[in-house]
Amino acid sequence: MNRDQDIQLEKDRARYGLLAVVVSNLAIASVAVFGVWRLNGNESVIIGVLTAAFTAVSSMTTAYLGIKAVSNTAKSMAAASAAPPAQTPTTPTQRTP
């Protein structure tokens, strides 16, 4: 694969990964809202539902961001180690006649 295809692949992975996280978070939030609506004021159960929903959303988002950060770091380290080392100019040795 060439560099342009790699960049496009990474963009697609990031885009669809973020889409999956957003859709999952929206699904969790909608189920929590529906659950709270159906409980009709039972406060202790509502607190449990909202706590579980908040934990799920924050865990999902944190996991995505953590995996993405590690992936980006690993990719930049691999690119840095694969690059040829910089050439340092050398001075010619002096010859004595």
Image (cartoon, rainbow, N blue to C red):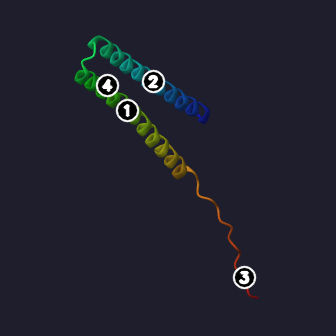
Amino acid type, mark 4: Leu
21, 86: nearer the viewer: 21
Q: Quadrant of the image for the N terminus?
A: top right
Question: Which residue is denoted by mark 3 in the rendering?
Answer: 94
- SS type, badge 3: loop
Question: Which residue is denoted by mark 2 in the rendering?
Answer: 22
Image quarter of residue 67: top left
Q: Is residue 38 left or right of residue 63?
A: left
85, 38: nearer the viewer: 38
Q: Is residue 19 left or right of residue 54?
A: right
Q: Which residue lies furthest to the right in this view?
A: 97
Image quarter of residue 33: top left
Q: Which of marks 2 and 3 is in front?
A: 2
Disc 4 packing (10 Å; few <14; some 14–19; many ≥20)? some
Amino acid type, mark 1: Ser
| Mark 3–mark 1 distance (CA, rounded to whole Å) | 67 Å
Residue 69, placed above or below residue 27: below
Q: Which of marks 2 and 4 is nearer the N terminus?
A: 2
Q: Can residue 75 be seen in this view?
A: yes
Q: Nearer the viewer, mark 1 or mark 4?
A: 4
Question: Which residue is denoted by mark 4 in the rendering?
Answer: 50
Q: Quadrant of the image for the C terminus?
A: bottom right
Amino acid type, mark 3: Gln
